[in-house]
Image (spheres, helix red, strand yellow):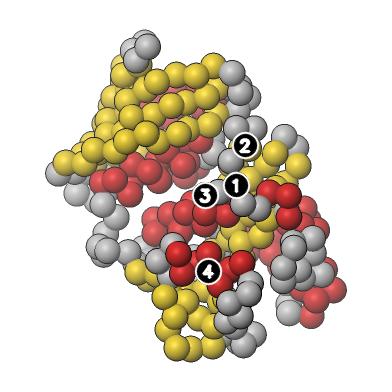
Amino acid sequence: MSPSLQFRPALPHHIAACIELRGRTRQNAVSTTRLAELGVTEASWSADVREDRLPGMLAFDGERLAGYCFGDATNGEIVVLALLPDCEGQGLGRALLDRAMSLLRERGHQRLFLGCSSDPATRSHGFYRHLGWRPTGKRDRLGDEELEFSFATAEPTPTERLLAYLQAYEAKDLARIEKQFADGIRLADWNLAVQGKAAALEETRKNFESAASLTIEVLAVYEGERRAAAELAITVNGEIRLRVVDALGFDEAGHIVSITAYKGL
């Protein structure tokens, strides 16, 4: 996957570009006209994003939209995963799917489902099965085969919560991070220590503003009771590479109560 790719949360003003890309995918392209026939327009899709009915994650290569994945917050369906043809085969599809699944997981869904072609010749047929999605024996409203994925536990594990935080941080999604933080969170790194959600969000915002781009590579994860830590390689602005360990603590509700970051050489 190209280090220049950046993940961002979907916002209503992104939808026009999403619709345009949907007609350019290598397989199962859907035109603007066909989407409208199915009841999907820029206005309706934008409204669903604005009202958090269709949370999604986008991937940009510079200013070019390279791909996206959206899920239905009301029922746990992965609604669409789409990539530009020249962005296939780089791990981007899995990265986007993982992030969309995490968004739905945070909204309380243990079981997810999607519609997929039953033709083994299509890329999607093997792609989802390789990642653990299994047929339900049903067909969706468009005649596609329904696949499902169930998380191992009813509640996200500390590791899943840690990865969700890192995904939000990489996407510079301050609104998502605000929902993850406990009111009394303590945030500390090699330069500072602050207490309370407002102060922690302010320091996070400053970090986001100081970096035009962030890429986080998870090297290893360690889990304990209500705790998880990860060894990370963080690339800032495409050139500065940091080795960091983030250790997170969680309360009974799953909110982050502490973040301690350690910088290596």
Q: Is residue 161 left or right of residue 137?
A: left
* Residue 90: image tag: 1
Residue 154 place in picture, x, y as percent: 26, 64
Q: Report the Cα–Cα distance between label 3 and label 1.
A: 10 Å
Report the amino acid beneath label 1: Gln
Residue 194 in sight in this render: no
Task: Tell me the residue at 61%/52% (across/down).
Answer: 89
Task: Tell me the residue at 69%/64% (across/down).
Answer: 45
Quadrant of the image containing the C terminus:
top left
Report the amino acid beneath label 3: Ala
* Residue 2: image tag: 2
Task: Tell me the residue at 39%/59% (across/down).
Answer: 105
Residue 181 place in picture, x, y as percent: 35, 39
Q: Mark 3 or 1 closer to N-term? A: 1
Verify CB contact (< 8 Å) between mark 4 and mark 2: no
The relative height of residue 34 versus residue 123 in the rendered view (above or below) is: below
The one of 126 and 183 positioned closer to us in this rendering:
126
* Residue 126: image tag: 4
Give the foreground label among 2 and 3: 2
The one of 211 and 195 positioned closer to us in this rendering:
211
Residue placed under numbered mark 3 in the picture: 95
